[in-house]
Amino acid sequence: MATPGMEDYLEQIYLHIERNGIARASDIAESLDVLPSSVTKMVQRLDREGYVYYERYKGLDLTEKGLAFGKKLVKRHDILEDFLRIIGVNEENIYDDVEGIEHHLSWNAIDRITDLVETLEQDTEFIKKLKDKKQ
């Protein structure tokens, strides 16, 4: 079972690989605003847990398990952003709000929120009513 910290690192590693084709410890340190030594310790742990391949002084690579979980973490983040946007949370608050709640919801809750977002996205009248209430 991955901890919230492990999830944050995996999510960033996944995003860097998706965007740039590579994830380096220095990139992850910058993204998470942590020391490179903290990245090294966590990456070693993620390697032991079977999420990443780690070789010193080389880029990071995700295992099949890490790739699948990284994708799931990014989807969770995106769906929560979509949900908060739909219900009218101010854009400048969304990222911090998602960061504050994403590790505290069960995967079952995420699945239900996903279903709700997909349903709401099809109901443009309801979304319009929500936006009208915000104003």
Image (cartoon, grey):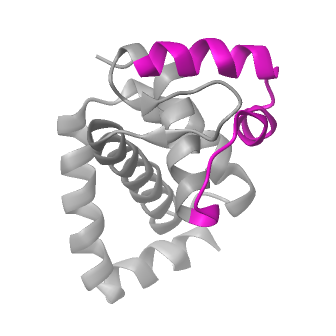
The answer to whether one can see residue 112 in this image is yes
The residue sitting at 50% across, 48% down in the picture is 14
Q: Which residues are magenta?
A: 19-47
Which picture quadrant has residue 49? top left
Look at the magenta stretch and give its main secondary structure: helix
The residue sitting at 62% across, 52% down in the picture is 94
Q: Nearer the viewer, residue 45 or 93?
A: 45
Relative to 2, say whether 100 is above or below. Answer: below
Residue 68, x across and y down, in percent: 28, 46
Q: Nearer the viewer, residue 35 or 92?
A: 35
Which picture quadrant has residue 66? top left
Task: Say if the magenta span includes residue 34.
Answer: yes
The C terminus - image quarter: bottom right
Residue furthest to the bottom in view is: 125
Q: Is residue 109 left or right of residue 75?
A: left
Residue 127, x across and y down, in percent: 40, 78
Residue 40, x across and y down, in percent: 66, 18
Task: Say if the magenta span includes residue 44.
Answer: yes
Residue 99, x across and y down, in percent: 58, 37
Tally the marks: 0
The N terminus - image quarter: top left
Which picture quadrant has residue 35? top right
The residue sitting at 30% across, 65% down in the picture is 117
The answer to whether one can see residue 3 in this image is no
